[in-house]
Image (cartoon, rainbow, N blue to C red):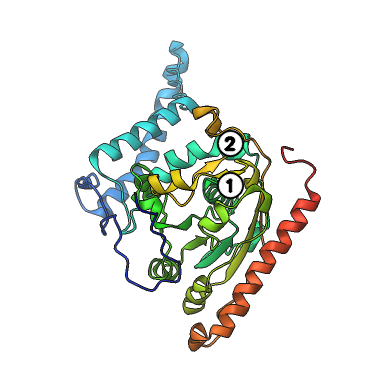
């Protein structure tokens, strides 16, 4: 098979998305009208005011006879018990299934399904995030509460689990519960099943056109400029950032006036220690690399289980871009300087986190 087709992030060609544009929604039901009374509104108000007085008069006249006859007031009906947590979850789940069956949910023109992501996909990733990798998040306050921003992170781990854990960290730890829209390589959208899940999670092609559109909508956009060079590097080069390309992500942020938030991820490098690369097998399968680790492929499917390393994700202070002139996005020297600034910030933070780390697993 042919080598995997990888198009750089700063390629400005128009790219066709696999997901159809437009939202999906079901037919809405009729809205019931409020109950109608007899007479004008003034008449109804007058009767409502007279009702308490009439009741008091009747109680006054019947009080003596009631007491003399020994009649007892009827007992009040007990209040209905509040639904339990299990009942609420069951009702919520049934309502979710009804909306999925009837089509009463929305998907944006990138294929992002917010409801499915919140209710199902995030719930599936959360045990891996909380219990397995025990991710610790720092600097979450550096992500803006609203408006577009570009989060730039290092990439590692042989398989792109770092992007998924980054997405859970932003959604669960940010006070505004923001969603991160990740930019992914073409290979992701050519794989069956993976393509559909990535689209539902809000991922899109790593091209300037899609990134600019999301930033203009005020979305959080995540990019890992190292690409396959970072995720497929040997274990001996762990935590050494690879080339960041020609600064396409900086140009996109400048055009949108969106801040750039550097992000450093520690712990992902060790989940699959890549000690070799079977290039011949990779070419046959059309993959950028075929990893060989201490456990894979020797242990078969069991060797694909990642090691339970302890992760730390730190977001640095945002680098503003709204103070530059519009033509600054075409200045190659400025692109180089800002790209180098972001890269150095991420690399320096990685070194600091590694020095403070007590153990790979604790």
Question: N-terminal of the two: label 2 or label 1?
Answer: 1
Q: In which quarter of the image is residue 19?
A: bottom left
Which residue is nearer to you in this view: 61 or 19?
19
Name the mark on residue 202: none
Q: Using a 10 Å C-alpha cutoff, classify the residue at mark 1 as few (fewer than 14 neighbours), some (14 to 19) or many (20 or more).
A: many
Q: Does 355 sit left or right of 62 as displayed?
A: right
For the residues labelled 2 and 1, say whether their Cβ atoms are less than 8 Å apart.
yes
Q: Where does residue 15 sit, x and y in percent of width and height?
A: 32, 66
**What residue occupies the far front of the structure in this picture?**
280
- In the figure, 57 relative to 355: above or below? above
SS assignment at label 1: loop
Which residue is nearer to you in this view: 91 or 51?
91
- Which residue does the image show at 41% across and 49% down from the upper left? 283
Q: Which residue is labeled 1 in the image?
A: 157
Q: Where does residue 304 sit, x and y in percent of width and height?
A: 53, 34
User: Does residue 274 appear in this view?
Assistant: no
- Which residue does the image show at 55% across and 31% down from the upper left? 303
User: Does residue 205 appear in this view?
Assistant: yes
SS assignment at label 2: loop
Which residue is nearer to you in this view: 334 or 44?
334
Q: Quadrant of residue 225?
A: bottom right
Q: Using a 10 Å C-alpha cutoff, classify the residue at mark 2 as few (fewer than 14 neighbours), some (14 to 19) or many (20 or more).
A: some
Q: Where does residue 337 sit, x and y in percent of width and height?
A: 62, 79
Q: Does 350 sit left or right of 107 as displayed?
A: right
Q: Which residue is labeled 2 in the image?
A: 306
**What residue occupies the far top of the structure in this picture?**
70
Alpha carbons under labels 2 and 1: distance apart: 9 Å
Q: Where does residue 97 sit, x and y in percent of width and height?
A: 32, 34
- Which residue does the image show at 33% across and 53% down from the upper left? 111
- Name the quarter where the C terminus is drawn: top right
- In the figure, 332 relative to 179: above or below? below
Which residue is nearer to you in this view: 175 or 71?
175
């Amino acid at each position: 098979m042919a080598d995997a087709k990888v198009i750089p992030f700063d390629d400005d060609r128009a790219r066709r998305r696999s997901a159809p544009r437009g939202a999906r929604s079901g037919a809405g039901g009729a809205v019931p009208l409020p109950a109608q009374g007899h007479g004008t509104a003034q008449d109804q108000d007058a009767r409502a005011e007279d009702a308490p007085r009439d009741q008091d008069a009747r109680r006054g006249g019947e009080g003596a006879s009631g007491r003399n006859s020994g009649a007892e007031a009827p007992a009040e009906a007990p209040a209905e018990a509040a639904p339990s947590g299990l009942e609420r979850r069951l009702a919520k789940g049934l309502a979710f299934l009804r909306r999925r069956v009837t089509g009463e949910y929305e998907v944006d023109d990138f294929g992002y399904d917010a409801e499915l992501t919140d209710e199902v996909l995030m719930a599936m990733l959360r045990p891996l995030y909380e219990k397995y990798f025990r991710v610790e998040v720092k600097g979450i306050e550096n992500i803006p509460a609203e408006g577009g921003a570009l989060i730039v992170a290092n990439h590692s781990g042989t398989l792109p689990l770092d992007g998924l854990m980054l997405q859970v960290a932003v959604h669960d730890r940010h006070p505004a519960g923001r969603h991160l829209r990740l930019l992914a390589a073409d290979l992701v959208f050519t794989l069956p099943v993976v393509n559909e899940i990535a689209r539902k999670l809000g991922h899109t092609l790593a091209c300037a056109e899609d990134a600019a559109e999301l930033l203009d909508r005020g979305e959080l956009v995540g990019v890992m400029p190292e690409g396959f060079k970072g995720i497929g590097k040997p274990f001996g080069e762990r935590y050494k950032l690879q080339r960041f390309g020609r600064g396409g992500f900086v140009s996109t942020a400048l055009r949108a006036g969106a801040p750039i938030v550097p992000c450093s991820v520690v712990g992902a490098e060790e989940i699959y220690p890549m000690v070799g690369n079977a290039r011949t097998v990779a070419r046959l399968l059309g993959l950028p690399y075929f990893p060989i680790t201490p456990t894979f492929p020797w242990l078969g499917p069991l060797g694909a289980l990642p090691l339970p390393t302890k992760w730390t994700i730190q977001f640095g202070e945002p680098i503003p871009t709204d103070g530059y002139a519009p033509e600054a996005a075409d200045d190659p020297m400025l692109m180089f300087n800002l790209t180098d600034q972001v890269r150095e910030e991420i690399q320096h933070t990685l070194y600091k986190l590694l020095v403070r780390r007590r153990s790979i697993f604790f």
